[in-house]
Image (cartoon, rainbow, N blue to C red):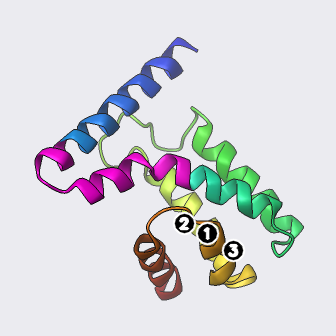
Amino acid sequence: MRALIIALAIAAAVWLLAIVALVIAGRRTHAKELAMLLPNLLSLLRGMIRDPRVGRFDKFLLVIAVAWVASPIDLIPEFIPVFGPLDDVVVVALILRRLVRRAGPEVVSDHWRGDPEIMRRILKLVRAA
């Protein structure tokens, strides 16, 4: 449990440093989007789990994605720079790709509370994959 708290504290510190660096660099809009990324993602997942347009199995996959990201057990340890979060990103990307293909991009966009341009970029990447 102590290791999890330390890992979360380190992740939060890196996240805050990235936001401060963006503000210092004059990219306030990017800093705001980064600051709101976690709440926006949680809102997206919660909305899609409750949406009747999303199938039961896809809702199950959403719950798996949340559990996978929240789990301290990973295929690649989180403390390895760049590659650490890669397994989390791949799992979430694959599930998001399936959701976009099954439920449609408009369902995903309906639940995104962040900058619509970011969601357009994500959907473009998902369609290209």
Return the residue nearer the eye: 96 or 109.
109
Residue underneath mark 3:
99
Residue 93 is marked as 2
- Secondary structure at badge 2 equals helix
Q: Is residue 11 shown left or right of residue 95?
A: left
Report the Cα–Cα distance between label 1 and label 3: 5 Å
Instruction: State if disc 1 and disc 2 touch (CB < 8 Å).
Output: yes
Image: 26 above or below 51: above
Res. 112 image quadrant = bottom right
Instruction: State if disc 3 and disc 1 touch (CB < 8 Å).
Output: yes
Residue at x-position 48% and y-position 73%: 119
Instruction: State if disc 3 and disc 2 touch (CB < 8 Å).
Output: no
Task: Give percent across and percent down for residue 3.
Answer: 49, 17
Which amino acid type is marked by label 3? Leu
Task: Give percent across and percent down for residue 118.
Answer: 42, 71
- Secondary structure at badge 3 equals helix
Which amino acid type is marked by label 2? Ala
Q: Is residue 23 magenta?
A: yes
Image: 96 above or below 8: below
Q: Is residue 7 shown left or right of residue 70?
A: left
Which amino acid type is marked by label 1? Leu
- Secondary structure at badge 1 equals helix
Task: Give percent across and percent down for residue 102.
Answer: 74, 82
Query: How many C-alpha atoms fall within 10 Å of the one at disc 1: few (<14), some, or many (≥20)?
Result: many
Task: Give percent across and percent down for residue 23.
Answer: 19, 47
Report the Cα–Cα distance between label 2 and label 1: 5 Å
Return the residue nearer the eye: 43 or 49.
43
User: Magenta part of the protein: which range?
Assistant: 21-40
Q: Earlier in the sequence, mark 2 or mark 3?
A: 2
Residue 96 is marked as 1
